[in-house]
């Protein structure tokens, strides 16, 4: 009898390496979570900002972001300003188009004006730069005037003073030379030539100029017909005429006047020859602006005439 053959079976267990959860999904979930967190933080920021502003401010922000204005016709239903009755009207389509065109024209004009002003501002100097340049030009002018005076050997007839208001040029009589004929507004030939030489030098700068005549304290016999006020004013006008006829721009002269004997150069000698003089004042920009304001040209206008404030005597 043949016994049954017993066959041994070998069981083979194959283990496969399982990939972990992290290996399957990688790091993508981290990126998604970071995006979600960032979006959530942004949402909280928006909610916090919106909660800290008023409703009117929120509406203004929305219209600004959209580029809209409820008064210009760029919104679906623009409105007008309140009328006399206090009602606010909604613009019709035609009125809205007309108003929109008109507003656009005004806006373009305003933008063009603003652009021009900005360009001009870039070209303009600051006030400090203008004043500094003006001061340097005045100092240079003083040197030129001194050089001309030396060439004419007239140092004793010229006095230069640099003051806060500008350059003061005093042309005076002395014992040897008289600027004008006695009691007359006629310039002597020497001073006529000297003033003629000054004119081109004064014209090289843009500063405004004042010309003032002065006399000594000598009185005229008939004060009613002619006095030192007349004489000093006429002498100043004659000096102006000589300067403008020899190259000085008339627009550069800001004021011409006479002061008679009210401001003597040598008060201790009221009849002294030095008191008979012409004063040419080359003003700084600040000084000329102050003079303009003094006469009300650039200053504030009268709001209410003084006469209206004075009560009637009746």
Image (cartoon, rainbow, N blue to C red):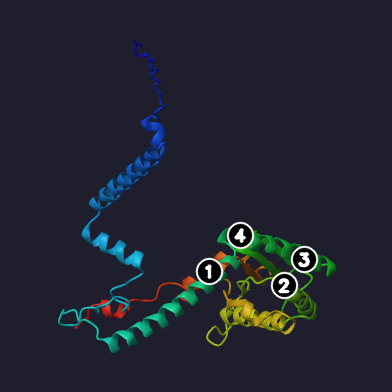
Q: Is residue 71 left or right of residue 223?
A: left
Q: Quadrant of residue 66?
A: bottom left
- What's the CA distance linking mark 3 and mark 4? 23 Å
Name the residue beneath numbered marker 1: 118
- What's the CA distance linking mark 1 and mark 3? 37 Å
Which corner quadrant holds the N terminus?
top left
Q: Answer whether labels 2 and 3 touch (C-beta < 8 Å).
A: no
- What's the CA distance linking mark 4 and mark 1? 18 Å
Q: Quadrant of residue 278?
A: bottom right
Q: Label 3: few (<14), some or many (≥20) within 10 Å? A: some
Q: Label 2: few (<14), some or many (≥20) within 10 Å? A: few
Q: Is residue 154 left or right of residue 10?
A: right
Name the residue beneath numbered marker 3: 144
Q: Answer whether labels 1 and 3 touch (C-beta < 8 Å).
A: no
Name the residue beneath numbered marker 4: 129
**Labels 2 and 3: the sequence-earlier one:** 3
Closer to viewer: mark 1 or mark 2: 1
């Amino acid at each position: 009898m043949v016994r049954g053959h017993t066959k041994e079976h070998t069981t083979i267990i194959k283990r496969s390496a399982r990939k972990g959860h992290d290996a399957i999904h990688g790091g993508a979930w981290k990126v998604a979570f970071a995006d979600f967190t960032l979006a959530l933080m942004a949402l909280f920021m928006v909610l916090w900002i919106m909660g800290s502003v008023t409703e009117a401010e929120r509406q203004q922000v929305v219209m600004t972001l959209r580029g809209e204005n409820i008064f210009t016709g760029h919104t679906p239903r623009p409105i007008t300003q309140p009328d006399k009755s206090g009602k606010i009207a909604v613009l019709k389509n035609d009125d809205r188009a007309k108003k929109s065109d008109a507003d656009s024209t005004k806006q373009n004009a305003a933008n063009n004006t603003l652009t021009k002003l900005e360009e001009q501002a870039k070209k303009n100097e600051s006030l400090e730069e203008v004043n500094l340049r003006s001061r340097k030009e005045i100092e240079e002018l003083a040197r030129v005037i001194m050089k001309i005076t030396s060439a004419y050997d007239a140092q004793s007839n010229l006095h230069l003073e640099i003051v806060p208001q500008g350059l003061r040029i005093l042309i005076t009589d002395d014992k040897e030379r008289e600027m004008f004929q006695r009691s007359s507004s006629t310039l002597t030939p020497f001073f006529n030539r000297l003033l003629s030489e000054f004119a081109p030098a004064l014209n090289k700068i843009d500063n405004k100029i004042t010309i003032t005549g002065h006399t000594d304290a000598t009185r005229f016999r008939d004060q009613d017909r002619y006095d030192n006020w007349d004489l000093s004013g006429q002498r100043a006008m004659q000096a102006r005429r000589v300067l403008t006829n020899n190259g000085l721009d008339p627009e550069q002269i800001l004021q011409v006047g006479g002061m008679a004997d009210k401001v003597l150069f040598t008060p201790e000698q009221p009849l002294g020859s030095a008191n008979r003089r012409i004063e040419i004042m080359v003003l700084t920009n600040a000084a000329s602006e102050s003079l303009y304001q003094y006469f009300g040209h650039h200053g504030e206008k009268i709001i209410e005439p003084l006469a209206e404030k004075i009560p009637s005597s009746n």
